[in-house]
């Protein structure tokens, strides 16, 4: 039975009902995160129709910060020579998901290595899933009417202005699919802004520069994976309740990693050590910006995974983790800017009003216009490129 056809079955599986479900009921991720649905969410097969929810839940915007992870393994901090930050983990250790979780919610995050998707920062993936889900829940309250969504955080105020869309467009695609497409595009813009703000001086933890992690090799792919995750969970029944969302997100994250080919902890640690001197260096300590020597800047709407083999020329191919011995193909993730002939940017405007830190003020469009818009991002990315090149050297934006 397809669990999407029965919200009550899903509720039983997730433990929403305490009566009316068999006492011996047990459900694993394969029940409500089947791999064929996961493959569809990641773009490998045709997606199915969304589950229609008459009254989708409305959630508060996620504002907490999940602290993770600088790229590398067993990293030392300047001034703390004894302490080491392991960073690397494996898919089986991630535990539950909590919408909008912060430091003390009981999640377990880190860098997971996968054969098809390279490195996944699970904190980035979870945060982008929560953000995408929030945006979908907001849009479903208003489409096809216009609306404005405002969020604080990420170094300022983020504003999304959505124009009215035609009822014919809603009838053609459905409100759920339209909301998912708009939310995913907006979340991708927000993800790029997050990296830019980190480079230009915003600090989630005051006193700790985040330039060391700006556009690190796993960031963009992890963000894209999280956006796909949040949209998929909304489509598959997460809008029924917060309980559904948390449990489905944990299951779907696990299934997405399974499809990408997760590597066990020791294999992942070995892979990270092989990248020492190529993408990062153990000779530097946090938060030295030169610790991560290669950065993945966005070049369009495709998030390309950086995998271990990409760091080496063909004649120096490294020993791969045993899980990757069959050399499965990479799985790029496409972030769409349109739905059919509907161009999202023509109906949606995204802007940012940087907060008091305003570290990149010299690069903003003008002293009079202190807000940043989507059309400003390419120019700001060019500034970051030039500054990173001056810091790390030519070729920093390539895996080898």
Image (tube, rainbow, N blue to C red):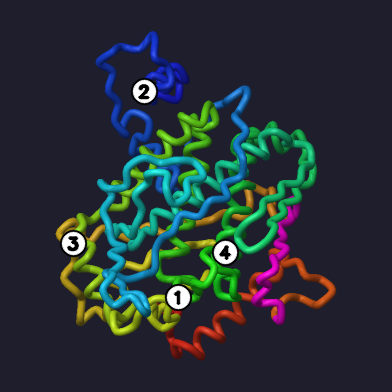
Q: How far apart are the two marked residues, 3 and 1, measured between alpha carbons?
A: 25 Å
Rendered location of residue 260, percent (x, y): 31, 52
Extreme residue in the right direction: 368
Question: How dense is the environment of label 2, judged by Cα within 10 Å: few (below 14), some, or many (20 and up)?
Answer: many
Is 183 situated above or below 265?
above
Rendered location of residue 182, percent (x, y): 64, 47
Range of magenta residues: 346-362
Residue occupying the point 77% across, 70% down: 370
For the residues bearing labels 2 and 4, Cβ distance under 8 angstroms: no
Residue that label 4 marks: 194
- In the displayed structure image, the side of residue 267 where residue 123 appears, left or right: right
Is label 3 in a helix, a strand or a loop?
helix
Residue that label 3 marks: 267
Of callouts 3 and 1, which one flags the residue occurring earlier in the amino acid sequence?
Answer: 1
Rendered location of residue 36, percent (x, y): 36, 38
The magenta stretch spans residue 339: no
Rendered location of residue 61, percent (x, y): 61, 44
Q: How far apart are the two marked residues, 3 and 2, measured between alpha carbons?
A: 33 Å
- In the displayed structure image, the side of residue 385 where residue 329 appears, left or right: left
- Name the disc covering residue 212, or none: 1
Instruction: Examine the rendering and report whether any part of residue 385 can be seen.
Output: yes
Residue occupying the point 45% across, 71% down: 213
User: Which quadrant: the C terminus?
Assistant: bottom left
């Amino acid at each position: 039975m397809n669990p999407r056809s029965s919200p009550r079955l899903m509720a039983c599986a997730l433990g929403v009902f305490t009566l009316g479900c068999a006492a011996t009921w047990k459900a694993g991720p394969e029940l409500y995160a089947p791999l064929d649905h996961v493959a569809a969410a990641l773009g490998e097969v045709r997606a199915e129709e969304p589950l229609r929810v008459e009254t989708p839940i409305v959630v508060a915007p996620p504002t907490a910060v999940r602290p993770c992870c600088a790229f590398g393994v067993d990293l030392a901090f300047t001034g703390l020579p004894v302490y080491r930050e392991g960073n690397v983990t494996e898919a089986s250790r991630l535990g539950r998901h909590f919408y909008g979780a912060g430091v003390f919610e009981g999640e377990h995050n880190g860098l997971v290595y996968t054969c098809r998707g390279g490195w996944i920062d699970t904190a980035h993936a979870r945060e982008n899933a929560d953000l995408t889900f929030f945006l979908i829940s907001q849009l479903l309250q208003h489409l096809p009417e216009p609306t404005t969504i405002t969020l604080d955080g990420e170094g300022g105020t983020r504003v999304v202005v959505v124009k009215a869309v035609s009822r014919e467009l809603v009838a053609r695609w459905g409100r759920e699919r339209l909301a998912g497409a708009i939310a995913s595009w907006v979340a991708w813009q927000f993800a790029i802004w997050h990296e830019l703000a980190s480079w230009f001086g915003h600090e989630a933890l005051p006193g700790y520069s985040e330039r060391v992690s700006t556009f690190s090799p796993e960031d963009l792919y992890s963000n894209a994976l999280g956006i796909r995750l949040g949209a998929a969970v909304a489509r598959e029944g997460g809008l029924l309740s917060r309980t559904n969302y948390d449990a489905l997100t944990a299951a779907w994250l696990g299934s997405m990693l399974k499809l990408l080919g997760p590597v066990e902890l020791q294999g992942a640690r070995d892979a990270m050590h092989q990248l020492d001197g190529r993408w990062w260096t153990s000779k530097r300590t946090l938060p030295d910006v030169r610790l991560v020597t290669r950065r993945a800047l966005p070049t369009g709407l495709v998030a390309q995974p950086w995998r271990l083999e990409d760091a080496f020329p063909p004649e120096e191919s490294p020993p791969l983790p045993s899980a990757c011995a069959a050399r499965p193909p990479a799985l790029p993730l496409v972030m769409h800017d349109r739905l059919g002939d509907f161009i999202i940017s023509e109906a949606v405007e995204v802007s940012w009003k940087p907060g008091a830190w305003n570290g990149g003020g010299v690069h903003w469009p003008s002293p009079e216009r202190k807000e940043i818009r989507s059309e400003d991002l390419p120019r700001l990315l060019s500034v970051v490129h030039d500054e990173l090149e001056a810091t790390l050297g030519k070729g920093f934006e390539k895996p080898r």
